[in-house]
Amino acid sequence: MPKTRIANRPDTREAIFQAASVAFSSRGFDGVSVDDIAAQAQVNKAMIYYHFADKLALYRAVVGDMLGTLGATATEIAASPATPADKLNRFIENFVHNAARRPWFPTMMLREIAEGAPHLDLATLELMRAVFLAFGRILAEGAAAGSFRRVHPVLAYTSIVGPLLMNAARERMAAQPGRSELPMFAEISHADLIAHIQLTAHRMLNPDAVG
């Protein structure tokens, strides 16, 4: 039975956003059409153009939703009176929890990075910059206090965020049928993931480490 299309219900924008998030994450920007998104959201295609200028604007809205949330929270964490070590722990925990609430984001971000970020405009990249600057502020504060050794912020950032994105992609691979028995797809709780990345980060930043 074909899906019934609803012209303009109160949750139309959210339905479009959710449908686009899943579609872009699964098939990439070029593999998804506006018709695909409209069918999945059960809306008339015109409603997509009513809420978003075009497919690219919709794509950027999906990516920007995660980056904007991460940037705002990371900035708040960096400005808090907590110790640099606690701020770093909270930064990692916040990233994992937000990625769990937006399971489409890691896959989208990995694909976008691999392709050279061709679909991200300056406004979206500014949201990414806010996340990185907050992280850098935490590192600088820790180095100034003597609790962190000085590490290039780009190397430190990719050493922490990279594994988090990769594990999210691993979880997605593990969810496919017939893979649960493969060792690399073993279930790992987010609590264990957070603890592991926090431990790895603190070892990397240990002021007594040789490097």
Image: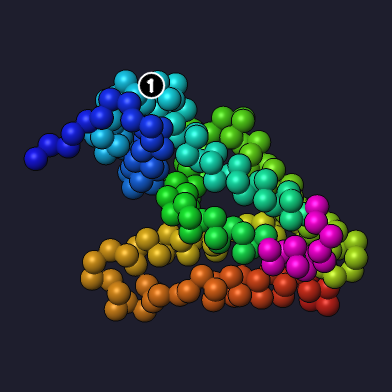
The amino acid at mark 1 is Tyr
Which color scheme did the rendering employ for the protein? rainbow
Report the number of numbered marks: 1
Which of the two residues, 178 or 154, is positioned nearer the viewer here? 178
The answer to whether one can see residue 99 in this image is yes
Give the prevailing secondary structure in the magenta stretch.
helix
Q: Quadrant of the N terminus?
A: top left
Instruction: Identify the residue at image location x=63%, y=39%.
Output: 127
Place of residue 45 in the rendered image (x, y in percent of width and height, measured from the top left): 29, 24
Instruction: Inspect the magenta stretch and tell me whether residue 86 lies in it.
Output: yes
Instruction: Identify the residue at image location x=68%, y=42%.
Output: 129
* Crowd rating for badge 1 (residues with CA inside 10 Å; few <14, some 14–19, many 20+): some
Place of residue 65 in the rendered image (x, y in percent of width and height, measured from the top left): 53, 41
Above or below residue 61? Residue 135 is below
Place of residue 149 in the rendered image (x, y in percent of width and height, measured from the top left): 82, 67
Place of residue 121 in the rendered image (x, y in percent of width and height, measured from the top left): 56, 30
Q: Residue furthest front?
A: 10
Above or below residue 96? Residue 3 is above
Please, what secondary structure does the residue beneath circle 1 have? helix
Q: Quadrant of the C terminus?
A: bottom right
User: In the drawing, does residue 153 fall left or right of residue 71?
Assistant: right
The answer to whether one can see residue 114 in this image is no
Instruction: Identify the residue at image location x=24%, y=66%.
Output: 177
- The span shown in magenta is 79-90
Instruction: Inspect the magenta stretch and tell me whether residue 150 lies in it.
Output: no
Above or below residue 147? Residue 139 is above
What residue is disc 1 on? 49
Q: Residue furthest left?
A: 1
Instruction: Identify the residue at image location x=53%, y=34%.
Output: 120
Which of the two residues, 174 or 19, is positioned nearer the viewer here? 19
